[in-house]
Amino acid sequence: MTINAQETKSQPETKMDIFLSKTGVVRKFIDYNLTPLKSTYESTETRVRRFIIDSESKFFFQISKSSKYGKRVASIEYTDLLEVMKALSILKESVNSDVSSNPDYLENKFITVDGFQVGYYVSKGKAKWYAVLEKYGSDNTIYFDDVNMFENICIEAKTKIEDLRK
């Protein structure tokens, strides 16, 4: 009789998971609430969360929404937030031409290293903006009509993080 064992691949760790994986240390977090994001179907909370372990700090822009399966939270590390903001500019430039190409269905999005997604889809001649908060699970997508509002909240988060870093 022969038995072969295989390692199962676990979900990749996020930047927040890696930072918080230290054991035997005191860790603190502080929240700074931002403007709520008004999405199409629900309101979401936004904040900057500062994690402090020993003398090291990390900042994350967090977007959370309640769902029937619990709270869904995106934690976007500062450098990823900068990339999201760059991607939003590119996406905003291409949305009108994508709509005018009149596809049956088109999706255009940006995905961070940690799995946060922001983008839009085009269907029936209209674009709909969305963000996927968590890489895995269900009921983790928010839809919003005004991409500029989302972009403004990202700017607010970036400014708050930069002020806290001083």
Image (cartoon, helix red, strand yellow):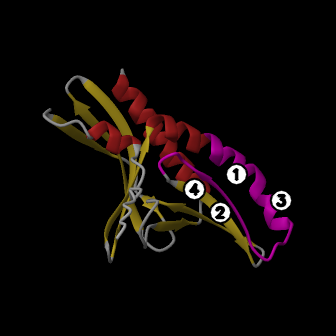
User: Three-letter amino acid code at disc 1?
Assistant: Leu
What residue type is disc 4 on? Val
Q: Which residue is mark 4?
A: 118
Q: Where does the magenta region start and end?
A: 86-114
Q: Quadrant of residue 143?
A: bottom right
Q: Nearer the viewer, residue 12 or 49?
A: 12
Above or below: residue 27 compared with residue 46: above
Indicate the quadrant where residue 139 lies.
bottom left
Count of marks, rendered view: 4
Q: Which mark is residue 120?
A: 2
Circle 4 crowding by C-alpha within 10 Å: few under 14, some 14–19, many from 20 = many
Q: Which mark is residue 91?
A: 1
Q: How far apart are labels 2 and 1 at the CA level?
A: 8 Å
Q: CA distance from mark 1 to mark 4?
A: 9 Å
Q: Secondary structure at mark 3?
A: helix
Asked if labels 4 and 1 touch by Cβ distance under 8 angstroms, the answer is yes
User: For mark 3, what is the residue?
Assistant: 97
Q: Earlier in the sequence, mark 4 or mark 3?
A: 3
Q: Nearer the viewer, mark 4 or mark 3?
A: 4
Residue 2's image quarter?
Answer: bottom left
- How far apart in space, not on screen, are marks 4 and 3 (Cα)? 18 Å
